[in-house]
């Protein structure tokens, strides 16, 4: 799969649960941060879109957990997207850097709402 963007991060202690692995909810934060950085890398500010009345919002998320991340693990989020009329579909995979094992495979569907109405917008 050809990715269009990569972002490296490191697991922080407070992101882990009692089992010593990253709590599942934190993976959504990782994916969201990577999408925002992806937009910024293309000169698109999420805040500026909002100021123009364009809100890109998540309509669905599928996450498949493969290998747990632990405190101190460095990882990379690799992303690509496709534009399908009303939706931007982001395919985002997280890899543990030490061995490049897949930690998570995610698919995030987003839509654009312009002044409160679902709209077909070409932002990317």
Image (tube, helix red, strand yellow):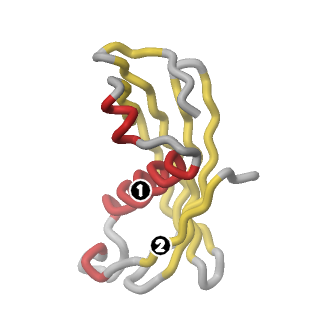
Badge 1, how many Cα within 10 Å: few under 14, some, many 20+?
Answer: some
Where residue 40 appears, as percent x and y from the top left, is 50, 49
Q: Residue under circle 1?
A: 33
Element type at mark 1: helix
When the figure is inspected, residue 121 is found, relative to residue 3, above or below; the finding is above
Q: Which mark is residue 91?
A: none
Where residue 15 appears, as percent x and y from the top left, is 29, 73
Which residue is found at the position 49% from the left and 41% from the top?
44
Which residue is found at the position 56% from the left and 36% from the top?
89
Where residue 6 appears, as percent x and y from the top left, is 60, 61
When the figure is inspected, residue 5 is found, relative to residue 76, above or below; the finding is above
Quadrant where the image shows the C terminus: top right
Circle count: 2
* Residue farthest toward the right in the current orientation of the protein: 2
Badge 2, how many Cα within 10 Å: few under 14, some, many 20+?
Answer: some
When the figure is inspected, residue 29 is found, relative to residue 42, above or below; the finding is below
When the figure is inspected, residue 93 is found, relative to residue 90, above or below; the finding is below
Q: Residue under circle 2?
A: 9
Where residue 77 appears, as percent x and y from the top left, is 55, 62
**Pointer 1 with pointer 2, Cβ within 8 A:** yes
Q: Is residue 74 left or right of residue 2?
A: left
């Amino acid at each position: 799969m050809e990715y269009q963007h990569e972002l490296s991060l490191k697991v922080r202690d407070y992101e882990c649960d009692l089992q010593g692995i990253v709590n599942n909810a934190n993976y959504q934060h990782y994916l969201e941060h990577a999408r925002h950085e992806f937009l910024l890398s293309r000169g698109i500010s999420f805040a500026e879109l909002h100021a123009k009345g364009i809100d890109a919002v998540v309509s669905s998320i599928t996450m498949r957990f493969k290998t747990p991340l632990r405190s101190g693990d460095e990882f990379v989020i690799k992303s690509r997207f496709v534009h399908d009329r009303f939706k931007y579909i982001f395919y985002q995979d997280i890899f543990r850097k030490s061995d490049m094992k897949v930690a998570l495979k995610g698919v995030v569907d987003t839509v654009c709402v312009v002044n409160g109405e679902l709209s077909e917008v070409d932002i990317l």
